[in-house]
Image: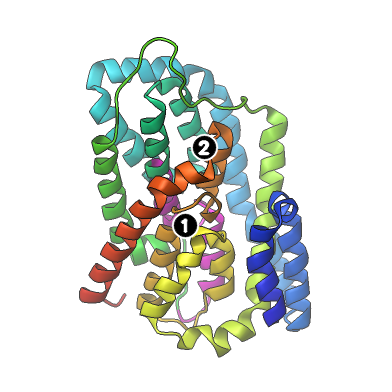
Amino acid sequence: MTAILLVVLVAPFSSRRIEENLEPFLLVMGIAAASVSRQWSNHLVQEALVEPVKITLAVLVAGVLFRVVRDHIGKTIQAVIRNVGLRLFVFLLVFVLGFLSSVITAIIASLVLVEIISHLKLDSASEARLVIIACYSIGLGAALTPIGEPLSTIVIAKLKDAPHQAGFFFLAQLIGIWVIVGILILSLLAVRFHGHLIRGRETTLTEDRPENLTDVMIRTGKVYLFVMALVLLGAGFTPIIDAYFVYVPRAAIYWINTVSAVVDNATLAAAEISPKMSPAYIRFLLMGLLISGGMLIPGNIPNIIAAGKLKIGSRVWARFGVPLGAVLMVAYFLVLTLLPYES
């Protein structure tokens, strides 16, 4: 089992081919993990087939709706900026997308961000910073509901039974205040780095190509396979989690999860979360994953989508994303440590 865990964590980072075919790779690893640990049961098969349905439907419906309205985004942006000004616009952009991501999913929120940035026409350096800040916000907000992103889906799936009895609003209650404060801080930070609108022919960030209906359907299928794989991985890794992870101090697991900067945080959640953990412990674990996931492009879905479509390089992202993430990690750690509370 340890070998499978290491392959799951290392292979996507070390092989571009695996990274580009992450969903089938994780599905194979999930089947292997469940088989080696002898976790197969009718209940697990049913769970693997059913748990991805809600987030998959959310991605499909939101994706289709986005295709309908995307042609009107450009004119709407210019009208809003004229009425409220650029500073308030960038604040609202980060703030609203952060909260909407828990409903329309992090994937669609990221696509909306890409479309808005393509029409915004700020200087390119400011646009890159704004994208990074907004992706941090989307990554945080999407964790509030199980349809927001695969990480929240798998956490709810693993904690839905006793003793946590996690329902739809479990994560909103557990980490809601920390997420809300984070989104607010990021929105204010966006105002600080909003830059200026440009005129003329200066190059700005632009979406590589508009999506078609085929793209929407392919993405929907990938989300289903991804969550299915995470359910199987979570079940397969249960013996390792219960034997080791539940005994790691919560302060340690918080900093260990900085690896989420280079490993998808949903995969790490599947490998770490256990019902045997206390709410306070789970809070430390999740906040470490969510914040560090924004530092580098591979850390979470919003980063991958936005960087890929807007052609933001890894160095450009790291130059701003890593210092921002480091400050947030330290700040959250101090507050979580000094003001602990149990749910």
Above or below residue 233? Residue 305 is above
Query: Residue 333 location in percent, x, y?
Result: 30, 69
Amino acid type of the residue that numbered disc 1 sits on in the rendered structure: Gly
Q: Can residue 133 be seen in this view?
A: yes
Q: Which quadrant does the N terminus fall into?
A: bottom right
Q: Quadrant of residue 120?
A: top left
Q: Local crowd at mark 2 within 10 Å, few (<14), some, or many (≥20)?
A: many
* Mark nearer the viewer, 1 or 2: 2
Query: Left of 329 or right of it: where is 51?
Result: right
Residue 307 magenta: no
How far apart are the two marked residues, 1 and 2, measured between alpha carbons? 17 Å
The reply to whether discs 1 and 2 touch (Cβ–Cβ < 8 Å) is: no
Number of numbered discs visible in the structure rendering: 2
Q: Can you tell which mark lies on residue 312? A: 2
Magenta part of the protein: which range?
A: 134-163
Res 103 visible: no
Which residue corresponds to the image point at 40% horizontal and 20% vertical from the top-left?
Answer: 121
Amino acid at dot 2: Ile
* Rendered residue at 36%/67% (across/down): 174
Give the image location of residue 82, x and y in percent.
27, 15
Give the residue at x 36% y 32%: 126
Asked if residue 337 is positioned above or below residue 51 in the image, the reply reads: below
* Residue lying at the far left of the rendered structure: 338
Q: Residues within 10 Å of mark 1 (few under 14, many from 20)?
A: many
Q: Which residue is drawn at 25% across and 17% down?
A: 83
Q: Mark 1 points at which residue?
A: 293
- Quick one: 56 or 226, which is closer to the camera? 226
**Residue 84 locus on image (x, y percent):** 23, 22
Left-right relation of 214 to 342: right
